[in-house]
């Protein structure tokens, strides 16, 4: 598929304003330039960057357009966090990108600066960023291709217990991951269809609590 066809297909699935499209064009340009040095994404996915990364991220923005305080764990090259922030039209929002890989965090900072996005980059692990995140009234936590669902809940638990929603992009093994997660966690889950992966699902988690062990009882 050509680059132009890839973009057209992605924006047909997830339409955006002209202003957002221009930001995303600049983000893709930056990604291609940095990729030659930093290897930010899988090389094979770069030819389909709009469908594989941009549209996959945009679907979260369309699901939760009114969120004002968002935390994205394991942001990598900015998917979904930078893409979501690119759709925001006002500056009274905060996107917190948590990325422990130094070269990827450097890209996130440069891209946020170049695009004029309301983004704060945390160049550290999630647990190290958590004390700051807990002061920011985070409403939603996202992650894409970071870890299994039970581990994501573990990472996000302090924010989820304060009322934040978890919104996690998952593949065809989502049912198995949910079953495994219920061994340690009680939660309310909704599965939303993915626009970019017929076998994939977007998992929405709320009302999270840890399962008490018999010893604790």
Image (cartoon, rainbow, N blue to C red):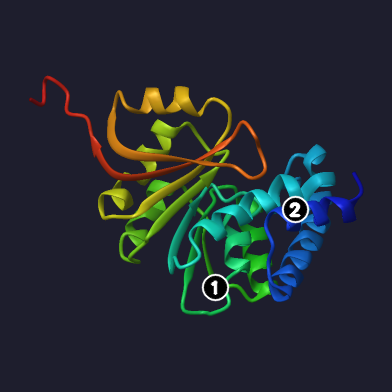
Report the quarter where the N terminus lies. Answer: top right
Can you identify the residue that label 2 sits on? Answer: 10
Above/below status of 13 relative to 93: above
Count of residue discs: 2
Q: Which-is-in-front pick, marks 1 and 2? A: 2
Q: Secondary structure at mark 1?
A: loop
> Circle 1: is it few (<14), some (14-19), or many (20+) Cα within 10 Å?
some
- In percent of the image, x 58 and y 66: which residue is there? 85
Can you identify the residue that label 1 sits on? Answer: 118
Report the quarter where the C terminus lies. Answer: top left
Above/below status of 168 relative to 104: above
In percent of width and height, residue 151 lies at 41, 34
Nearest the eye: 84 or 196: 196
10 horizontally vs 69: left or right? right
Q: Secondary structure at mark 2?
A: helix
186 horizontally vs 36: left or right? left
Give the alpha-carbon distance from disc 1 to disc 2, as whole Å: 24 Å
Q: Quadrant of residue 12?
A: bottom right
- In percent of the image, x 31 and y 65: which residue is there? 135
User: Which comes before the other along the chain, label 1 or label 2?
Assistant: 2
């Amino acid at each position: 598929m050509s680059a132009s066809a890839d973009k057209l297909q992605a924006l047909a699935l997830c339409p955006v304003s002209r202003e957002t499209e221009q930001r995303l064009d600049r983000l893709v340009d930056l990604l291609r330039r940095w990729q030659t040095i930093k290897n930010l994404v899988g090389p094979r996915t770069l030819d389909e960057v709009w469908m594989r990364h941009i549209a996959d991220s945009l679907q979260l923005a369309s699901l939760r357009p009114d969120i004002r305080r968002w935390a994205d764990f394991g942001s990598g090259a900015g998917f979904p966090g930078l893409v979501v922030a690119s759709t925001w039209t006002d500056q009274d929002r905060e996107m917190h990108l948590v990325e422990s890989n130094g070269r990827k965090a450097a890209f996130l900072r440069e891209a946020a600066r170049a695009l004029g996005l309301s983004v704060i980059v945390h160049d550290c692990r999630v647990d190290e960023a958590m004390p700051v995140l807990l002061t920011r009234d985070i409403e939603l936590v996202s992650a894409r291709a970071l870890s299994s669902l039970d581990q994501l809940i573990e990472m996000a638990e302090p924010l989820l217990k304060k009322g934040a929603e978890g919104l996690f992009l998952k593949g065809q093994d989502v049912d198995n991951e949910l079953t495994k997660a219920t061994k340690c966690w009680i939660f309310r889950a909704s599965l939303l269809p993915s626009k970019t992966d017929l076998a994939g699902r977007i998992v929405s988690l709320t009302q999270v609590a840890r399962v008490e062990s018999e010893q604790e009882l």
